[in-house]
Every structure is written in C-alpha cells, then in structure tokens.
Image (spheres, grey):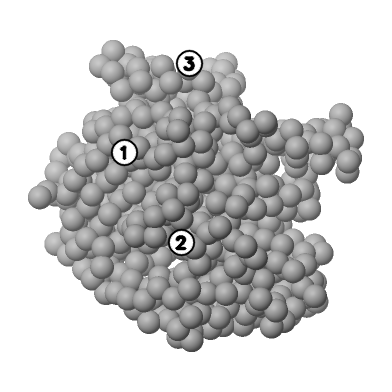
C-alpha cells in the first residue's frame, strides 16, 4: 500500500483550480477530494528512486474554502490519523477581496536540541500554531518564501550523523550535502515539522531559491565559480540542488497551463524514471543561462507578483556582469506593462534591491575595483573583499541596479500604472522598509523595498551594529567617499529608511485592497507568540 512520505503542499491557486504536491512511498494514483465535490487525480512520477505527484484540483468556486482529503490508490492518507490540526482547506477568494501576502526568508529548519532553540521560536511554526488554535483567525491568502528554504551548507547535528552513515565526512564537502538523496533528507527535516506540514497544506505557497539552497554566496563572481568548479564535489552538488529545487519548489510555482507546455514536465512523465531528463535540465541551467527560467509571474486578482531569479540567472564575466542575463531581463520587462491590468506590482527577489547606504556604496565600490577601475592590485583586493564580506547584492551589479530602477520608474509613472511598487526581499537577516525617490521626476506612486528575514535564524552582534550604522549620516558620507574612490556613477535613485532595522525571527504581511496597501511586521517572542512590532499604511489614505 502506498504511503504519504511528504506533503501535501497546497501550491498554485487561482479561484477555479489549484495544485497539491505530494511525495509517496511507491508508484500510485494520487487523488484530492474536496468536501464540496471539487477533485483531481494524478499519477506519480519518479526521480532518483522517489515518487511524486502534482495533482490539479478543478471545480473550485470563488468565495469558498472546502476542506480536502488526499487518497493514494483510493486509500485515505491525509489528514493524518488523530491529527491535532484543523482540516486542510483550499481557499478560493472572491473577486474584489483583499489579498494578504505573508513573506519572509531564511528558515534554518533543524529541530532544537533538548527542546532549546538557540535562535528562538520559528516564525512559521508560530504562525501555524496561531492559525490552528483560532479557527476564526484570518490566514494569509498566499505565503511567499523568498529563499533559503533549506541549508545545504549548514546542516544540523542530526543530519551530519545521518550523512556520516553514508560517507566519510573528512572528505570535502564534509557535513554539507552532496547528492539528490541528501537534499531529500533536508526537505524531510524541514517540511515534516508538524506545524509546517499543516501550514503548507492549507496556505498556498510560492517559492524561490537563494544561495544556501545551493551554497553560501552562490554565483558571487566568475572567479568564485571557477574555484568551485575546480573541486571534486561542486558539479554533483549543483545538479542535485537544482534537480531537488525543481521537484520540491519550482513545480508548484507553475500554473497547470504552464505545466502543460513545459518540456521538462513532459519528459519526466514520458519515462518510468525522469532522473536523466531532470539532470539534463540542471546541466542546461549551469551552462546555458538562456535555456532555463526559474523566474515566474503570478496574478492574485489585481495584484501582480513577478518573482525574479537573482541567483542562477546571473552573468558573471566582469565585462558583462549582470544580475539577470539579457533574456531574463527582457522577460521581466514583458511582465510589467503599465496597462491598467493590475493595481499593485510586487517584485520578489531574494536579495534586496535597496540596502543601507553604506552597504550599497561599498558593494558598488567593490564592483568597480573588481572591474579594474583602480588597477590589477585593487582588483585582487576587491575580489577578496567581495567573497569575504558577501558583497553580491543588486548594488554589486550596478548596471542591473540602474536597469531595475529605470523599469520601476517607467512602470510607476505610467498613467495606467499600479498604485504602488513593492520590492519584497530577504537574505540579510533583519527587516526594514526603504522608500525610493527619483532626483529628476519619477513615479508619483510609492515605491518601497520591504525586507523581511529571517524566519528562523540569527545574525551576529557585529552585523547588527553594522546594519544599524549603515543608515546613519556618517555612514552615508563614508559610502560616498568609497564611491568616489571607485569612480562609481551616482545611483539613479535615492532612498530613505522608513522603518527598522528589526532583528529576530519575523514575518511581514502586506494587505492589498483595491489601490491601498497596509504592512504589518510580526516578530516571535520568548513565549512563542507573534507580536506586532510595526504597522504602516503604505499608500495615501
């Protein structure tokens, strides 16, 4: 009899259909049965000895929230027996309803030793407990996970013991994961957490990777990549990471219509074992940037989300360095026409576009040094600084930073443009709000960087101090001096901090109703609750 190994995860939803992802113990037919008669079935597919299904549920009605069960070969497997959680549901908002988007990044999912969590309560666990204990609580309409869903390079003690049973941890990369099976172990560790499992079964989620899903500072520079490719383990790690990401995260970001035209999806289903087809996709993603796209667009009523791959799509050659390859940049432009078809534009990118001023100028200065602006000796110093201090955000790709600023200005200035442009990011292990403005005109609507991280992690005291100081007037002066030394062009956009920095495990919720936007930041407390530390109306009242 087939068993449920992982899931269910409620992924794509659009009011009339939804997709539900599961991993099973063997080949079978997976089925979702809703309490109102909506349903869907799908056969499993196989990758590296694991069996998965992505079930398209049809017949949903706007304004309803039916509960659902999962059956494998007609045997019920979800809800789990004696579950302490409410039934999982598929909500289909009615037209005109507010859209509540909860987002964050950086969730180190290792279970605490002896019940003591060294980094404090997990914000997603805490959210799940609140929703489960209060049936009348308003859940998010969508959960955006902006990177570092798993940590391939920072594993738990339990995972390292498990790895030691498979191979010699004295051989690089030691206690880091190397292959597809080891990545699956990370997803089990993260998504079998009872609270997370229930939360992801009942709140639609969309995801994108960041560096730790593969390795810290993934694709920092061409020199970094050359050093990684010279190791014995990098190629296997990269391919396994991209393959497991496609299965566990990327598939659920796509609509049924997109899946129907996806050649890799078809290839995986056309053979009893889709491992080779999926490995071929990962190899193309490594060698031919234009051939694979992990970015995607979703519309929630009149809210448009464009999730940008700011890791795998990079161009790393110093003479052509860019956050997005030309095809990806053109795709992004095509997704944001100012044609009146949406009221709010959300740009999701794991890495913040707007940083504390000192950090921004330092990254731009370092990029100029690495490009040879001050000669070969400074270029070598710049590369060491870039790797040692993680100087690889949008500011470290100045042309891409300016191109995104221009695109946002064009979209936000159009007569039929959105009521606001909200750039959602994580990565930097603290939260803040930064409002953009353009020295020579620019959008008449608010443009803000909304950064929320971590969901469950920590930041050293030295970095806390640095992030606080980075917004100060003396820091801005120091940053301008560095930019002058690097002969950096002045940024085309200005920005000021509107809130933060906030530290701790946290989540932001952006509530969008018609052309208004409201933000709430919640942080976990020692007694395992979520406490509101900041609320703000982001659009004029």
The secondary structure type at the circle numbered 2 is: loop
- Answer with mark 2 or mark 3, whichever residue precedes in sequence: 2
Residue 256 visible in the picture: no
Foreground of the two, 127 or 492:
127
Q: Horizontally, is 440 left or right of 34 in the view?
A: left
The secondary structure type at the circle numbered 1 is: strand
For mark 2, does the 10 Å Cα neighbourhood hold few (<14), some (14 to 19), or many (20 or more) residues? many
Q: Is residue 120 above or below residue 283?
A: above
For mark 3, does the 10 Å Cα neighbourhood hold few (<14), some (14 to 19), or many (20 or more) residues? few
- Depth-wise, is mark 1 or mark 3 nearer the camera? 1
- Answer with mark 1 or mark 3, whichever residue precedes in sequence: 3
Q: Tell me which residue sits at (48%, 80%) in the image.
A: 35
- Answer with mark 2 or mark 1, whichever residue precedes in sequence: 2
Foreground of the two, 332 or 255:
255
Q: Tell me which residue sits at (42%, 49%) in the image.
A: 130
Q: Which residue is mark 1?
A: 532
Q: Horizontally, is 239 left or right of 431 in the view?
A: right
Quadrant in the picture for residue 417: bottom left
Whole-angstrom CA distance, mark 1 to mark 3, is 26 Å
The secondary structure type at the circle numbered 3 is: helix
Q: Residue 414: where, in percent of width, then height?
A: 18, 59
Q: Residue furthest left?
A: 541
Q: Tell me which residue sits at (65%, 44%) in the image.
A: 214
Q: Residue 148: where, in percent of width, then height?
A: 56, 43
Q: Which residue is mark 3?
A: 462
Q: Residue furthest front?
A: 82
Q: Which mark is residue 203?
A: 2
């Amino acid at each position: 009899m087939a068993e449920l190994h992982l899931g269910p995860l409620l992924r794509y939803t659009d009011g009339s259909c939804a997709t539900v992802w599961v991993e099973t113990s063997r080949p079978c037919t997976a089925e979702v049965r809703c309490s109102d008669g909506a349903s869907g079935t799908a056969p499993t597919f196989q990758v590296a000895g694991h069996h998965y299904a992505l079930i398209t549920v049809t017949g949903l009605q706007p304004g309803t929230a039916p509960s659902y069960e999962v059956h494998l070969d007609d045997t019920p497997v979800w809800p789990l027996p004696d579950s302490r959680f409410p039934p999982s549901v598929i909500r289909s908002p009615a037209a005109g309803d507010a859209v509540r988007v909860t987002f964050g990044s950086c969730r180190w999912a290792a279970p605490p030793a002896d019940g003591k969590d060294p980094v404090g309560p997990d914000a997603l666990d805490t959210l799940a407990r609140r929703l489960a204990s209060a049936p009348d609580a308003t859940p998010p309409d969508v959960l955006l996970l902006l990177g570092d869903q798993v940590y391939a390079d920072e594993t738990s003690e339990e995972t390292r013991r498990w790895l030691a049973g498979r191979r010699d941890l004295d051989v690089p990369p030691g206690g880091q994961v190397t292959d597809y099976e080891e990545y699956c172990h990370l997803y089990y560790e993260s998504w079998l957490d009872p609270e997370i499992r229930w939360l992801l079964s009942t709140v639609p989620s969309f995801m994108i990777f960041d560096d730790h899903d593969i390795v810290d500072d993934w694709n920092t520079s061409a020199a970094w990549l050359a050093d990684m490719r010279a190791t014995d383990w990098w190629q296997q790690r990269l391919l396994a990471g991209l393959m497991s990401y496609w299965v566990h995260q990327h598939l659920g970001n796509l609509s049924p219509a997109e899946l129907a035209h996806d050649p890799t999806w078809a290839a995986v289903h056309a053979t009893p074992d889709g491992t080779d087809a999926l490995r071929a996709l990962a190899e193309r993603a490594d060698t031919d940037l234009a051939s694979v796209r992990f970015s995607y667009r979703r519309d929630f009523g009149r809210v448009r989300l464009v999730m940008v791959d700011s890791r795998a799509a990079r161009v790393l050659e110093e003479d052509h360095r860019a956050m997005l390859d030309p095809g990806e940049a053109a795709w992004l432009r095509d997704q944001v026409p100012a044609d009146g078809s949406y009221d709010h534009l959300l740009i999701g990118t794991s890495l913040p576009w707007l940083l504390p001023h000192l950090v921004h100028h330092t990254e731009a200065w370092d990029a100029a040094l690495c490009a040879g602006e001050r000669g070969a000796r400074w270029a070598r110093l710049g590369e060491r600084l870039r790797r040692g201090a993680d100087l690889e955000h949008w500011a470290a790709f100045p042309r891409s930073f300016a191109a995104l600023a221009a695109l946002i200005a064009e979209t936000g200035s159009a007569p039929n443009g959105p009521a606001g442009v909200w750039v959602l990011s994580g990565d930097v292990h603290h939260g803040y709000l930064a409002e953009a403005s353009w020295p020579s005109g620019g959008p008449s609507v608010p443009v803000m960087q909304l950064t929320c991280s971590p969901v469950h992690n920590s930041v050293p005291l030295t970095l806390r101090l640095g992030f606080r100081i980075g917004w100060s007037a003396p820091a801005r002066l120091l940053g301008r001096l560095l930019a002058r030394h690097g002969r950096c062009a002045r940024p085309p956009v200005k920005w000021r901090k509107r809130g933060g920095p906030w530290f701790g495990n946290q989540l932001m919720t952006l509530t969008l109703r018609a052309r208004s936007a409201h933000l709430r930041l919640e942080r976990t407390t020692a007694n395992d609750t979520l406490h509101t530390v900041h609320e703000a109306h982001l659009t004029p009242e």
